[in-house]
Amino acid sequence: MIRDRLNHHIEERIEAVLEPHIEQWLHRFFRTDQGEALISEVMADFLLSWLRPDDAKGSYFQKTLLEVIRQMVRDDPAFRDAVIQTLNPGWDHEPGLR
């Protein structure tokens, strides 16, 4: 019990000292050559994994795009008709039919 309280007290003190400085330290680090290299590496890994198909179900990009379209259709029903028209420019359909 005393050990838990002591650990908790130590954690609170460390947070109180470090937390106000962490954001400042991170900004300073990311402005260095090593920080920029780290950001570039992480972004490249992210983009490659985002665009790479997984289990033949499509890429993360495709899944993200479809989810954005679903949300836009929910928020704006006319958006669905605009997507249909964009994907099938020669297709003659009546707006609002589903």
Image (tube, helix red, strand yellow):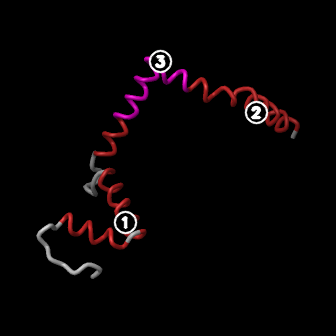
| Viewer-nearest residue: 85 or 98 | 85
Q: Is mark 2 on a helix, strand or loop?
A: helix
Quick check: is 31 in the magenta stretch?
Answer: yes
Res. 70 mark: 1
Q: What element carries label 1?
A: helix
Residue 12 drawn above or below residue 83: above
In the rendering, at what x and y percent does residue 58 appear? 27, 55
Q: Earlier in the sequence, mark 1 or mark 3?
A: 3
Q: What residue type is labelled 1?
A: Arg
Q: Residue at x 39, y 69 (%)?
A: 76
Residue 75 drawn above or below residue 7: below
Residue 76 drawn above or below residue 66: below
Which residue position holds label 2? Answer: 11
In the rendering, at what x and y percent does residue 27 appear? 54, 26
In the rendering, at what x and y percent does residue 49 appear? 33, 42
Residue placed furthest toward the top: 33
Q: Which of marks 3 and 2 is nearer the N terminus?
A: 2
